[in-house]
Image (tube, rainbow, N blue to C red):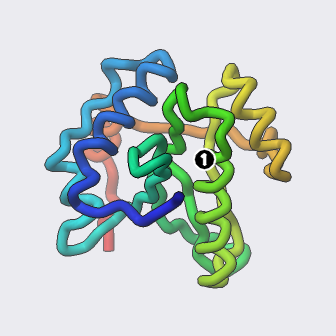
Amino acid sequence: MIRTATVDDVPVIHTMIRELAAYEREPDAAKATEAQLREALFGEHPAVFALLAEDAGSPVGFALWFRNFSTWTGTHGVYLEDLYVRPEARGGGHGKALLAALAEICVERGYARFEWSVLDWNEPSIGFYRSIGAEPMDEWTVFRLTGDALRNLAGVSNVNAA
């Protein structure tokens, strides 16, 4: 069963985020707190959204997503930040059900794209994504600014955010 997360789900989402970080070989990189997740998901102006997969009433996976926008299509889309299914529940259709629920959101709302990133070494996930018709964007490279590089650029930027 797939359902929209509630504020009571924040602790289990937080736990699964840490499980995902360990799976992705970055256990110390997941620094978000439950309070930060609660505010992002359920604060006055939610910026992200979450779905939970359950099996016999127990949470076995989640999808955390936010809206993006394509200037080419002129429409919003969904960017999937995290998709995770606990190891004991993998192969039970939960990941596909979470993706299908997000695809349904896209179709219902007229969004043109549903996108996400995957680590290049994660062959099981890449194979799964290809099996549902997803196509890799091989000509694109993700760039990221964090830490000192982010602060340094902010210190020299002449652009004022609107």
Q: Nearer the viewer, residue 3 or 119?
A: 3
- Three-letter residue code for mark 1: His
Q: Nearer the viewer, residue 154 or 125?
A: 125
Q: Residues within 10 Å of mark 1 (few under 14, many from 20)?
A: many
Left-right relation of 19 to 123: left
Disc 1: which residue: 94
Q: Nearer the viewer, residue 149 or 96?
A: 96
Instruction: Give the SS element for disc 1.
Output: helix
Left-right relation of 34 to 47: left
| Figure check: 155 above or below 102 | above
Q: Work out whether residue 149 can be spotted.
A: no
Q: Work out whether residue 46 can be spotted.
A: yes
- Quarter of the picture containing the C terminus is bottom left
Q: Position of residue 73 (x, y in %)?
A: 72, 77
* Residue at 19 percent of width and 67 percent of height: 43
Q: Position of residue 156 (x, y in %)?
A: 30, 45
Q: Position of residue 17 (x, y in %)?
A: 37, 36
Task: Identify the residue at the far top of this view.
Answer: 25
Total count of labels: 1
Task: Identify the residue at the far left of this view.
Answer: 35
* Residue at 58 percent of width and 75 percent of height: 76
Q: Quadrant of residue 153?
A: top left
* Residue at 53 percent of width and 44 percent of height: 83
* Residue at 77 percent of width and 38 percent of height: 128
| Figure check: 5 above or below 112 | above
Task: Identify the residue at the far front of this view.
Answer: 56
| Figure check: 53 above or below 119 | below
Left-right relation of 65 to 161: right
Q: Position of residue 159 (x, y in %)?
A: 35, 62
